[in-house]
């Protein structure tokens, strides 16, 4: 059986992020480690966590707030 799981390495131990069906305690397994590259921008790790409806609602709020900005306030 081959499975790909996500885990966190902590204190010298790999800890799965979700339960692993089909593997009993103390079963010897072979592990291949692939470290995910860091996200180029900190906000990118949040990409995709909002539903389309939530994202549209947030964009509406942002657009409404930007309409209240007076561009002349930013001039020297």
Image (cartoon, helix red, strand yellow):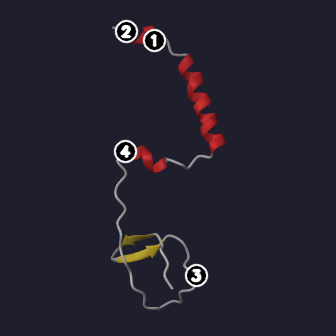
Mark 1 vs 3, N-terminal side: 3
| Image x and y of residue 59, in percent | 58, 32
Q: CA distance from mark 2 to mark 4?
A: 30 Å
| Other-residue count near label 4 (Cα within 10 Å), few / some / many at <14 / 14–19 / ≥20 | few
State the image coordinates of residue 49 (x, y, percent, origin top left): 55, 50
Callout 2 secondary element: loop
Q: Which residue is mark 3?
A: 21
Disc 1 packing (10 Å; few <14; some 14–19; many ≥20): few
Residue that numbered label 4 is attached to: 41
Of the residues under marks 3 and 4, which one precedes in the sequence?
3
**Residue beneath the point at 49% across and 78% down:** 3
Q: Quadrant of the C terminus?
A: top left
Instruction: Answer whether labels 4 and 1 touch (C-beta < 8 Å).
Output: no
Residue at disc 1, secondary structure: helix
**Disc 3 to disc 2, C-alpha distance:** 61 Å
Side of 14 relative to 24 (left or right): left
Return the mark for residue 71: 1
In the foreground, 49 or 26: 49
Residue that carries the numbered disc 2 in the rendered image? 75
């Amino acid at each position: 059986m081959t499975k790909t799981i996500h885990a966190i390495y902590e204190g010298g131990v790999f800890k799965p992020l979700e339960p692993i069906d089909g593997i009993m305690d103390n079963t010897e397994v072979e592990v291949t480690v692939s470290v995910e590259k860091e996200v180029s921008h900190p906000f990118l790790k949040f990409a995709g966590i909002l539903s389309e409806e939530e994202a549209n609602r947030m964009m509406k709020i942002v657009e409404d707030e930007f309409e209240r900005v007076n561009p002349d306030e930013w001039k020297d």
